[in-house]
Image (spheres, rainbow, N blue to C red):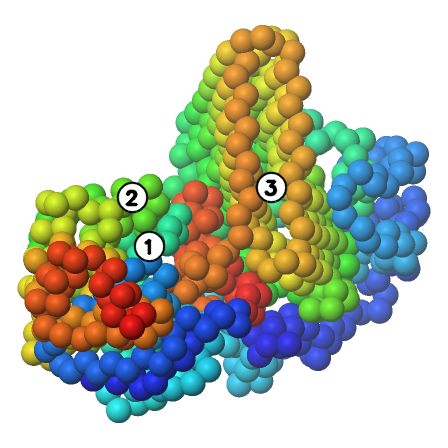
Amino acid sequence: MLKINDLHAGIEGNEILKGINLEIKPGEVHAIMGPNGSGKSTLSSVVAGREEYEVSKGAIDFEGEDLMDLDPEERAHKGIFLSFQYPIEIPGVTVTNFLKTAINETRKAKGEEPMPANIMLKKMREKMALLEMDKGFLSRSLNDGFSGGEKKRNEIFQMAMLEPKLAILDETDSGLDIDALRIVANGVNKLKSKDNAVLLITHYQRLLDYIVPDFVHVLYKGRIVKSGGKELALELEAKGYDWIKEEMAL
Amino acid sequence: MSSEEQLLEEVTGSEYKYGFYTDIEADKVPAGLNEEVIRIISAKKNEPQWMLDWRLDAFEKFQKMTEPDWANVTYAKPDLQAISFYSAPKQKKELASLDEVDPELLKTFTKLGISVDEQKRLSNVAMDVVVDSVSVATTFKKTLAEKGIIFCPISEAIQEHPELVKKYMGTVVPKTDNYYAALNSAVFTDGSFCYIPKGVRCPMELSTYFRINEAGTGQFERTLLIADKESYVSYLEGCTAPTRDENQLHAAVVELIAMDDAEIKYSTVQNWYPGDASGKGGVFNFVTKRGICEKNAKISWTQVETGSAVTWKYPSCILKGENSIGEFYSVAVTNNYQQADTGTKMIHLGKNTKSTIISKGICAGKSNGSYRGLVKIGPRAENARNFSQCDSLLMGSSCGSHTFPYIETQNKSAKVEHEATTSKIGEDQIFYCNQRGIGTEEAIALIVNGYCKDVLNQLPMEFAVEAQKLLAISLEGSVG
């Protein structure tokens, strides 16, 4: 589904990613872990197509198509979803209106008719129940005055509504208390299928207790320095990142 | 220049291709402003002596006045001696079908969601007599007449209801109020008159009717709206479709009178020709709008301003009666080289009077937008309350936004609150929308409409939808 080949990218002339290789197949859950400043968020931004980042070398291929020439919205239309580490506030635009626009713009791009309002509303209710969200949520301004936990839950709610093929969850666990974390993880698990894939970007093992990855990669100084199964995450949790750094220094 | 800007420019500039012609040469008064011209205007309209006297008195006073220059706008002052102050109703070349209309103009109509019938009317295509809107207009007239509501051109009101016109015209905006109000008083050509009798709730938005009847609005419009005791009316002027006019100077006067327990809701959508992307041409829109509230009355101004090269406009309320309420909701968009100096005045004279001001400025391109507002609390206005919120949204880094709030209180019990914010549409916001599949133009429209929501919510439903689309079109191509 997603193939990243020798990706070098950075911002304002600073190279942050220095040769990333990663392949994600349908049905898989991958986790990328790493200390602060290792390039985790840069990777998610580059895949989503954020303009400020320059790709100097390498390729990103999604379902056999080169992503490099596609605008962020075109990538979204192809089924790439990014759950933001810091979701953005848009005052005056309700959650409903935002989602309606997002869904119908995506349908338009695919040459489909807008989703009928009653079907959309039904779907919203279903997904909100899945994430144990209050109905009043829909008429609030997008992320405006939301608590950290509400923002993250809203990201997963949008993911549930948009049904992406590849969901990149950037530090979705940060700012969540344990109950919210369980609800969010539960939502992600229920949305998983053999046809879609999840890329978790996280600092801590905690999230991986709830969303169990098939593969864990350690990102350090812009490179994936170690890959393994879910046990790698436990090892990291126990030993911290220092042993990776030491291994690297050798 | 982006393709959208080109489209906008073509649309706004295209009507000149068809040209205008004056029906009969003899029906045009020579250029210039003098007493003779005013006599001719009055005679053409068959006006009674009192009306002519009123005009001449205004003209005499006007001659002693000078054009003000305190507004935060710069422009070449119009040469009044070069303007012809009266010409026969402008006749555009009539087209046989929509096929003859500029396709770009039609595209804009479609974007705005304007019906085919109305598209025809706006682009001056000959219509069958049985076209819906015409019969609808007749139905409206009947319904209004049954309720005793008078709604007609002011020139007709001068003939048919002189007692009302005489009693109220100039009472809210005196002839000498300001330079352009005085000019308007002397030379106004037409406008609307509306009277809602005591206890009557006008059963419809006067918008639809107005749009059908007011295809070519005049250069010096005069509107007088009287809501008698306990009555209610919602009135909408203007049009979201691109309105072009050969007149560069527009100086209108609008007077509202809300008697005891009456309510007037006055909404404006203004989309005059703003000039081209390089700042050439465009309408000067210098308008005086004011309403007076008697006891327990309420006046609510809502405006969405996207057009004109230079706008200069302060719809105001005089809260004379106790417990009266004044409201001002405004969205003013400036793009390219447009300049707008707009706001309101809330004059609290009565006890327990309340006013609310919500002003949303949006500046893009190299434009300049200013909010100028006055909240004045008189000595007898016990417990007067005002809340003002003035927000500006900037797009790009070449535009300017300014706020000039004036507060004068002469009563210690007054409570006046003022809040102001300035924000920029952020790349973060746009990227967030992009990531959800929403393209940049669409994202800007979404963000801007969210920002303006408090004002757009005040508009009559069908116009709110058009106004939203209009905002998007006005700002196309302004980011990225």
Specify the amino acid type for callout 3. Phe
Element type at marker 1? loop
Q: Amino acid at mark 2?
A: Phe
For disc 2, the neighbor class at 10 Å (few under 14, some 14 to 19, many from 20) is: some
Looking at the picture, which amino acid does disc 1 mark? Pro
Q: How far apart are labels 1 and 2 at the CA level? A: 10 Å
Q: In the image, what residue occupies the spot 51% across and 59% down? A: B471
Seen in the picture, residue B410 relative to B60 is either above or below; the reply is above
Q: Which residue is mark 1?
A: A87
> Nearer the viewer's eye, disc 1 or disc 3?
1
Outermost residue on the front side: it is A250
Q: Is residue B276 visible?
A: yes
Query: Are the residues under badges 1 and 3 in a single subunit?
Result: no
Q: Nearer the viewer, residue A83 or B289?
A: A83
What residue does disc 3 label? B193
Which secondary structure lies at badge 2? loop
Residue shown at 26%/74% (left/top)? A225
Between B347 and B297, the one lying in front of the other is B347
Q: Residue at x 54, y 9 (%)?
A: B413
Label 1 chain ID: A
- The local secondary structure at tag 3 comes to strand
Quadrant of the image containing the C terminus of chain B: bottom right
Circle 3 Cα neighbour tier, 10 Å, few/some/many (<14 / 14–19 / ≥20): many
Q: At 40% across and 34% down in the image, what residue appears?
A: B201
Where in the figure is residue A187, as x and y percent of width and height? 10, 59
Q: Which residue is mark 2?
A: A146
Same chain under badges 3 and 2? The reply is no
Q: Is residue B235 above or below residue B44?
A: above
Q: Is residue B47 left or right of residue A59?
A: right
Front position in the image: A16 or B244: A16
Question: Label 2: chain?
Answer: A
Q: Position of residue A128 (x, y in %)?
A: 13, 53
